[in-house]
Amino acid sequence: MYKATTVAVLLLTLHFICRAQAPRPQPVFPPDTVPAEIIVSGGEDSLQLSAGLRPLRQIAGAPAAFYTYFWELGDGTFSFSKNPELHYKDTGTYRVRLYATNNYDDGKAPPTKPRPIKVKKPVRNSAWASHFFRGAGNIEMKINRNPRPGENFMLLMGYRNVTGDVSSGSLLLFYNEKQFAREGFKLEEKRSYHQEDSSSLQAVLTALQQPDNLSAPLLARGPAPMAASDAARTMVQSLQAAYSTHTVLHYSNASPGAEQFLFLEMHTLPEMIQDTNATVTMTAMLVPDNPQLPPETWQLEMAVVASHDPNRLQLKKHRINYRLMGRKKELTYKVQFQNTGKGPARRVAIGIAVPRQLNTASITLKEISPACVHCDSAYQQQSCIDTIQTKDSVYFVFRNIYLPGLQQEGVTDEDSTRGFVRYSVLFKKKPKKIPFSSSAAIIFDRNEPVYTNRAVARFIKGISPAIIAGYNFSPNRNDYTLRGPVQFGVALAPFSPDRPFFQAEAYAGILEKETSGITTSRDKRDTVIGRQPYLIAGRGSQTTITRNSLQLVPLHFRYNINRWIAAGVGVLAQVNITTQTTVTHTAYLSNPQQPATIVQTVSSAQEAPAQWFGSLHAAPFADLQAGRVKAGPAIGIRYLRQLSGETPNRFFVYATYKL
């Protein structure tokens, strides 16, 4: 029986060991690290590109996932088409890059790997149009996708010489706004195709300060050229104050009417995950070498996203300074939408849930695209926008428009499939310091609604310093007193919080006296003082401890119940810097004939050497305040329960003022 049991145990042990050592099936990871495959097809008359990409992984509940494309073609041209045609005018080897964006997909964007394409003969059909510039200026910017933490995106900077006067100049890009706590972007690589040279901001400022390059005819015209230089210098310094990072390039061969492009590959740092749904900006500036010509700027506004979605709700300046805001504080929202279908949309309806902190009646329409009139003033069948407001929502409805679909046949301009609504709204009153959010639903014609992200508004915490003055007393024993001068302290806490918070405090306790009661003993001996006989009726002693201390509150958890009452609990640590103990001996004298009547007392003090850093005491406490507890004056009472030392439990009554 014993052997059988032993064999069974051994077999079971061997079975579990074999199971533990057997190879476990490895999880299948998504192929997010596989670069996009660039495929070239066609002949001498026409070369066409296509892409081999990993299968899309649909986000549950979202519209159908799809890819969008940005091709850098290696000769200074580009394309946003799915299958672009190549237009190389010269022979040579061109490095083509594809930046594919996975919309409504739960993975990462496919990595970019350049592919060299060798062209032995120029392509016959070499006409190419950028469809890039929307305004009348000489500089603009565009990105292939919104920045996502941990990913790269392509920043395309285009410049041109519309009038023929801006043949040379400097191109400045400012990024990483100082208003954010940390840098969010890093310039990975910049590629140019028209002999642009790297320069510096100091070189630009130096050139703007020197009028030596002005010709005599220009100088004869008076101070106007210098006014342009002054304006450029002021703008550069202003942008330098707003952004922490910049890059500068100089160009010198822009032909009249020619369009030229810089390809800047930007990396969104992982730290930006804390600011997803934030609206960030980059600003480009063109400073002509001709000091008579004014500078030009172009600001690019982007949303930092957690996933790629062409339909988004953005809140500009989503971090609000609560200390400085008032009832008339204005928030600016922007709803972006894109028709990703195979046909045009004639009607686009946008419904937005307005947070209860905001006043729906104060909504003001700032800017829209496609541009159209308000329906109240439109004639029949005219393109227009209608605004419908309710108590807790607002609806913007584009009517009788033509918004092409991204997958519509013949659509080559991706921007034509996009639109947006920018509006402002005011607060009803100063709200509680608690984040709030909003989202939108977008309906293209009669399709199912597309729901956007949540745009969250957060308040900057801010620091609220406070001064405190108070007094300790202990009612525990009749023969004991704890007294001293007013104690002064300081505190640091978040400014005007509506949620539980931590507060740090420090106090200086100076000349605080702790006195024990007098202990007496009877004594019937005779004595003589100044030849006068006395009877010693009794003797007594009293101990007084005088200390200078530092009191710290490393842990203090508080909650503002409302604007007028607050409560807290915490722990106080007291370090006695100096401690002086004095024992006072007292003799009570009476007349020998009347021993019951004390006629005189004689005292002597015995002072021990001062002790430095003699002890450390801890005391948990409960606290209650009344007054303007968020910001302003208040009074409070605190009960401290002593855990160590001979000091009894005590109350601390104080007044405080929070800034």
Image (tube, grey):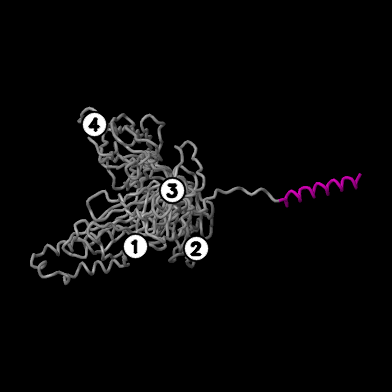
Q: Nearer the viewer, mark 4 or mark 1?
A: 1
Q: Earlier in the sequence, mark 2 or mark 3?
A: 3
Q: Mark 1 points at which residue?
A: 193
Secondary structure found at label 3: strand
Question: Which of 206/98 is in front?
Answer: 98
Q: What element carries label 4?
A: loop
Give the spatial CA distance, label 4 vs label 3.
35 Å
- Expressed as whole percent of the image width and height from the top left, the position of residue 331 reads 30, 42
Mark with earlier residue (1, 2): 1
> Magenta residues?
1-22
Q: Distance between the residues labelled 1 and 2?
A: 114 Å
Q: How far apart are marks 3 and 1 (CA)?
A: 25 Å
Q: Which amino acid does label 3 sit on?
A: Thr
Is residue 175 at least partly visible in the picture? yes
Q: Which of marks 4 and 2 is nearer the N terminus?
A: 4
Q: Where is residue 513 in the image (x, y as percent from the top left)?
A: 43, 57
- The alpha-carbon separation of the residues under discs 2 and 3 comes to 106 Å
Q: Do the residues labelled 4 and 1 touch (CB within 8 Å)?
A: no
